[in-house]
Image (spheres, rainbow, N blue to C red):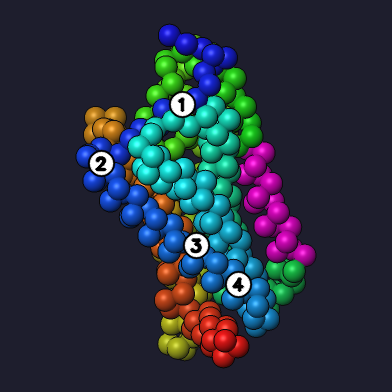
Amino acid sequence: MSNSSSITHFLLLPFPGTRQLQLLHFCLFLATYLAALLGNSLIITTIAWDHHLHTPMYFFLLNLSLIDLGTISTTVPKSMANFLWDTRAISYAGCVSQLFFFSSFLSAEFSLLTIMAYDRYVAICRPLHYETLLGSRACAQLAAAAWASAVLYVLLHTANTFSLPLCQGNAVHQFFCEIPPVLKLSCSTTYLREAGLVVVSACLVFVCFVFIVVSYVQIFRAVLRMPSEQGRHKAFATCLPHLAVLSLFISTVIFAYLKPPSISSPALDVLVAVLYSVVPPAVNPLIYSLRNQELKAALSKLLTGCLQKQ
């Protein structure tokens, strides 16, 4: 038995298998991490470089890419180091930092996806007021609100989590530190603060989800009323990447946190965690660039210009 004051490090959940399988996991994580770095960096650079992409939709996409870079950089490098050195240890401060930053990026992503739904609603349902409602100042304020609210919310969660006495050992049943596995190490019977935070969190998530659903109901109604088939196709095309990213994010997070305990196992928990912490940051740039002709054209011009300079 130990308490939180005597814990100097935590033990993360290792990936099962032989040493060769661990090295294979290292290679897969490295490839995914490099793909996420390349894809998101290209989107950020392209949007910042091409003034034609200085619009609210691409401004929020740039912020989404920054969040994806932060999300995957918080967990994957430490996991790769553990694979390589065949260790499970993470320092107490490292676990606190990893939990705080990962949860902050995850919360900021959901807030930003909600704002992006509002952006699509205004662009399609109220196009004449688009520049008024989503001017540069309004966009900056919305993005700042998403980041600030996520940091404040997670700061409360992190402070509460590590203020509880941790007397169930130091083995975190996940390959990175996040709130639920760390809370399982607590033997405290005082869960009132955490229960209050969970209720507030559930209410905020529900409000955001309802807002997204209502926005898309209005969007689909407006699109179906368009007389031109080409106009309907173009409007749907601007919404599909956001819907795909949103569906991937919500489905993986819901399954991870709300799956029945009867089907829970260490291997499944690790797999699900990979699906919502590693896969989306690598896949999101691909989703947004596949059907976006403006982004592809700007990226092509950027790469062509770089090659010509060489």
Q: Which sits in the foreground, 262 or 172?
A: 172
Question: Cα distance, mark 1 to mark 2?
Answer: 21 Å
Mark 2, Cα crowd under 10 Å, few <14 / some 14-19 / many 20+, is: few
Q: Which badge, 3 or 2, is on the more N-terminal residue?
A: 2
Q: Residue at x 41, y 46 (%)?
A: 80
Question: Cα distance, mark 3 to mark 1?
Answer: 28 Å
Considering the whole magenta stretch, tell me its main secondary structure.
helix
* Residue 300 x/y as whole percent: 51, 85
Q: Which badge, 4 or 3, is on the more N-terminal residue?
A: 3
Q: Quadrant for the N terminus, please.
A: top left
Question: Cα distance, mark 4 to mark 2?
Answer: 38 Å
**Amino acid under label 4?**
Thr
Q: Which residues are magenta?
A: 137-153
Q: Which sits in the foreground, 113 or 17?
A: 17
- Viewer-nearest of discs 3 and 2: 2
Name the residue beneath numbered marker 4: 45
Name the residue beneath numbered marker 2: 19
Q: Which sits in the foreground, 197 or 50?
A: 50
Name the residue beneath numbered marker 3: 37
Q: Which badge, 3 or 1, is on the more N-terminal residue?
A: 1
**Amino acid under label 1?**
Phe
